[in-house]
Image: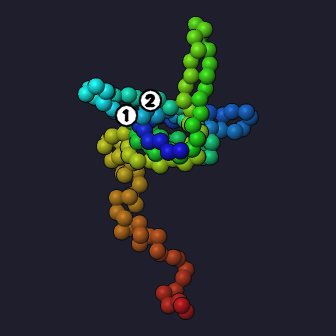
Amino acid sequence: MEITGRLTADAVVRTVSGDRKVTGFSIAINDTYRSGGEQKKVTTFVDCSYWLNTGIAEYLKKGGWVQLYGRIGVNAYMSGSGEAKASLTFHTSEIKLLGNASKERSSSTTSENPQQENPKAAETAANKFEGIDDDLPF
């Protein structure tokens, strides 16, 4: 299943059952529809977990757009007042970052990685091998 939404908060890495780690985050999915000629807006919140690589957490910042692949689930529980409640969960197997939360964050990300500022320089650096002569036999 594929879902796309905006992160509602920065991702958090939690340690569970000994040394296993999980990246937890929540997204909001906005939808609109017409009912009786009137446009309605609905926001669905989904709690997500990603078990494969906790390093992704530093890129999952509040307001960022993400596209997720995985499977959906439901958690049913009783509230403190005895009311039956449920929440949607998404067990994420793949994450695609679609955009930053703001232009300010994107400019700070670019300045931290000079190869993003000058793609030609990055290409030149990637094609440079030290210790190999220019006249290769093939």
* Residue found at the very far bottom of the displayed protein: 137
Q: Who's the residue at 47% across and 70% down the image?
A: 126
Q: Is residue 13 visible?
A: no
Determine whether, in the image, residue 78 is placed left or right of residue 25: right
Q: Quarter-wise, where is residue 113 in the image?
A: bottom left
Within 10 Å of disc 2 (Cα), the crowding (few <14, some 14-19, many 20+) is few
Q: Who's the residue at 42% across and 34% down the image?
A: 29
Q: Which residue is mark 1?
A: 31
Residue 103 locus on image (x, y percent): 31, 43
Q: Nearer the viewer, residue 38 or 95?
A: 38
Q: Who's the residue at 53% across and 44% down the image?
A: 1
Within 10 Å of disc 1 (Cα), the crowding (few <14, some 14-19, many 20+) is few
> Tags 1 and 2 in contact by the CB under 8 Å rule?
yes
Q: Who's the residue at 37% across and 64% down the image?
A: 119
Q: Quarter-wise, where is residue 5 in the image?
A: top left
Determine whether, in the image, residue 2 is placed left or right of residue 111: right
* SS category of the residue bearing label 1: strand
* Residue found at the very far top of the displayed protein: 81
Q: Amino acid at mark 2?
A: Thr
Q: Amino acid at mark 1?
A: Asp
Residue 20 locus on image (x, y percent): 69, 39
Residue 13, above or below 95: above
* SS category of the residue bearing label 2: strand
Residue 3 locus on image (x, y percent): 47, 42
Q: Which residue is mark 2?
A: 44
- In the picture, which quadrant includes the C terminus? bottom right
Q: Quarter-wise, where is residue 73 in the image?
A: top right
Residue 50, above or below 46: below
